[in-house]
Image: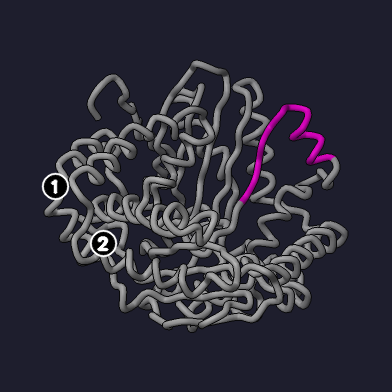
Amino acid sequence: MSGSFRLEIQEVSAAGRTAWLIEDNSVPVVSLAWGWKGGAALDPAEHAGALALGGALLTEGAGSLDATAFADALRDEAIGLGFDTGRDGFEGSLRALRPALPEAVRLANLAMRSPRLEAAAVARIRARAVAGARAQLETPRGQVGRAFWAAAFPDHPAGRPANGTVETLTTLPEEAIRAALARQVRADGLIIAAAGAITAEELAKVIPELFAGLPEGAPPEAPPLPPFTPFGQRVVEVTAPQSAILFGQPGLPVSDPEWEAAQVVLRVLAGGGFSSRLMEAVRVQRGLAYGIGAGFDVLFGQGVVIGSSATDNARVAETLAVTRAEWARMAESGPTKAELDDAVAFLTGNLPLQFTDSRRIADTLLGLLRNRRPLDWLNTREARLRALTPEGAAATAKRLLKPDELAVAVAGKPEGL
């Protein structure tokens, strides 16, 4: 990167594992993030939500500490510890003041190695998950998301909710939760990132302590992602004054050489707030919706182009017509020179905001590792973006955007569809 903002990423090896680190001693805080491939995709269909439920239970007591004692131990040292289940991965993270790091590592290891999974905790977390799944189905937004992904990937775990459904969560046996954690939380297959007041030497000592005692081996491979199904248009009837809209199409793999050019194209088309073409056409010029946007949703290393909006039932048809027209216009001619310059200026100028605290830094590094980026990816990013030309961006737009394959799901009572 040009200018004074450069990232010094260190590669740290310990106990057969490699981590990325950005050391920053401006505040005495350390953040660690780690993850595995797999996630909800490893849940059998009849046990959908098992891993998500298990991940939520990891901080509900471990080893000799029941749920209350474990929560007290975290609170007493101001430790943040959590686990997150995605459609294609499972992640853990911790954040602690430097003096509390040994205790944070001990508790994180205990949670992964010896979760209690007590009946009372399982019942409580299950009830919360079921309530959340049920509430989601009561809104157009929740209904449209479920319908869209089920139609886009009808025969793959990516097509079902990562957190499970009311039906699967209600009947989920405790053995399925234990089995989900056992196949996911392993000693191998890890990606690890760290940021804050910790040296490379200190991190090398922390890594084996954090993952000590975990079962050997990596999680099993998830089924490969099939091609996106351009399913046309689906309408889910929901009694509401507004309809929720989700639209999308096949994208590009994160390894594609035109990945960054595609990000620029999508920013101009649908990701730049009031400066995007869709926002200008849909909201500013016509007042059809309060907001509209689109971008890449990455799963299994594949970027799927996803966009969303919400509008009055009577305006859904016009909103979609305008959206399709702008999609086709961008595919035909690409961004202008001014639009390209503005998008590149934003993407390069906005990058430092991702590095304002250790937690965000660790998460960003983990994302780079997940996408198999080289160590200098961010430091060379500005040069790559500034090398983009209108002609190159137009070629990427033509290759990326497929107006005829734009699939649309609507939940509400839209008129004219």
Q: Nearer the viewer, residue 196 or 145?
A: 145
Q: Position of residue 38 (x, y in %)?
A: 50, 64
Q: Nearer the viewer, residue 198 or 297?
A: 297
Q: Disc 2 or disc 1, which is closer to the eye?
A: 2
Q: Where does the magenta region start and end?
A: 69-83
Badge 2 density bin: few <14, some 14–19, many ≥20, Cα 10 Å: many
| Residue where numbered disc 1 is placed | 389
Q: From the viewer's perspective, tell me whether residue 177 is left or right of residue 20.
A: right
Q: Position of residue 298 (x, y in %)?
A: 41, 59
Q: Is residue 210 visible?
A: yes
Q: Nearer the viewer, residue 397 or 152?
A: 397
> In percent of the image, x 29 and y 19: which residue is there?
4
> In percent of the image, x 27 and y 56: which residue is there?
262
Q: Is residue 27 above or below residue 83?
A: above
Q: Amino acid at mark 1?
A: Thr
Count of marks overlaid on the render: 2
Q: From the viewer's perspective, tell me whether residue 14 is left or right of residue 143.
A: left
> In percent of the image, x 36 and y 64: which residue is there?
302
Farthest right residue in view: 120
> In percent of the image, x 34 and y 77: which residue is there?
405
Q: Which mark is residue 374?
A: none
Q: Nearer the viewer, residue 71 or 337?
A: 337
| Residue where numbered disc 2 is placed | 330
Distance in Å between CA atoms under marks 2 and 1: 15 Å
SS class, disc 1: loop
Q: Is residue 184 above or below residue 138?
A: above
Q: From the viewer's perspective, tell me whether residue 13 is left or right of residue 176.
A: left
Q: Position of residue 153 (x, y in %)?
A: 46, 78
Q: How is colour applied across the structure in the image? A: one colour
Q: Amino acid at mark 2?
A: Met
72 magenta-colored: yes
